[in-house]
Image: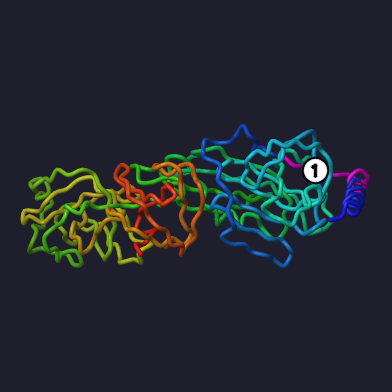
Amino acid sequence: MSRKYFNTVLLLSTTLLTGLALSHPLIGHADASTQTSNAVATTTASASSTTTSNGNTYGVDDDNIVWITYPSMSVLTTYTGTGTYYNADGSDTNTTVSGTSGALGEVRINLNQRTAYVWDSMLNATSNTSARLYRKVTSVSNFMYLSSVYTTKSLTINFVDTDGNSIDDSMTFDFPDNSDKLENALLDATPTVDGYTFNSAAVTTGSDDNPAVTYTFTKNTSDSGSGNESSGSESSSSATSSTDSDNLSDSSSADSTSDSTTSTATKVSVSKILVYATRKIGLYKTVNFTKNNRIRWYQKQPRTKRPTFTVIGYARTKAGTLRYKVKTTSGQTGYITANTNYVGNTYYQTNPKKITVINTKGINAYRKVNLTGKVRHYRKGTVLKIKTIKHHGITTRLILTNGTYITANKTLVLKK
């Protein structure tokens, strides 16, 4: 954009803003004071984006940074005071800027920071998306709409556990909205909360037509990963069993049908491990796999959707068949087979040398073995070379040739 054109447009927008009664004040409650201890993500290319008939484009970067762009000169903005410019990942550029007016280009929500940013397409007129500079949404004092399709919506984002209890700071801010909902992109995001694993996202709309997005998390019961990695399971290769034909059908011949046999079954002292089901298995109340004792079936699933369990104990039936006492991801306890034809290690136990990312949302690489300090994101289909494998609690991590850590969960990565 030429300097002459820039000054002309700036003068025009300033005149419009001062000559008209500005409504729709921006109310931002997600300032630096509400940031959590989560590491700031480094932005990579968006995994996907959608362009709508209204000219808006929206998408998600790095699983936790949601953005929406606006058509040129559709919404004019004014800023107050002296603020700071930030990069697209929310990092401080240490560059200050005084308040003025311009044209809204993009709203960017950093879910892990609990902060929102805006890019002004006129004050920072660049076609290079990686060179864009952003201000915190709290520095914007007003929006003025040049198109009747835009209105102001107050968006609330909540972080709760499976019981609906708040587990982290929520955020609320106003933004220009039309039929291209920002919440559509928020549904595709996967934010993080320390000590929890992401479960689901849902949108509700109040009587005032203002949307609320609620992210639900499951509390981690053991150190089975952090960040955006799924909590998985692993099994010790030493925990094998004899032929276990009663995995696919209830048996009354090999095992007694009485629940009392559980207390007399041989106890096996082994450290807590994690497992997943590779074929159809049942979850039972006791070590006796009978119809009356069965809690539920787990059907055979594709690798990326295999049911996972935390092994919290071991026991044998009177016939000597080994069972795993497990806790499910929902917290239910029971017994499953220990037959390696039906269950196996969820995490690799030896170095696979090369892996392919199979998780649909990709995986992240981290600086630390506990999967914190995210370095970058790898999309589904990426092939990575593995330097070595490292045990961490009851899980394992894969160390890449550049020294960063990734998950060794077999539902997320596959040996090549």
Q: Nearer the viewer, residue 46 or 256?
A: 46
User: How many labels, in total?
Assistant: 1
Q: Is residue 241 above or below residue 86?
A: below
In the rendered image, residue 253, in percent from the top left (x then y), is placed at: 7, 64
Outermost residue toward the top in this view = 33
Q: Residue tagged by mark 1?
A: 142
Q: Amino acid at mark 1?
A: Asn
The spot of residue 344 in percent (x, y) is 25, 58
Q: Is residue 276 above or below residue 268?
A: below
Q: Where's the C terminus, which quadrant?
A: bottom left
Question: Which residue range is magenta in the image?
Answer: 15-27
Q: Is 303 on the left-hand or right-hand side of 378?
A: left
Residue 50: in magenta span: no
Residue 96 position in % (x across, y down): 75, 36
Q: Main secondary structure of the magenta part?
A: loop
**In the image, 85: left or right of 274?**
right
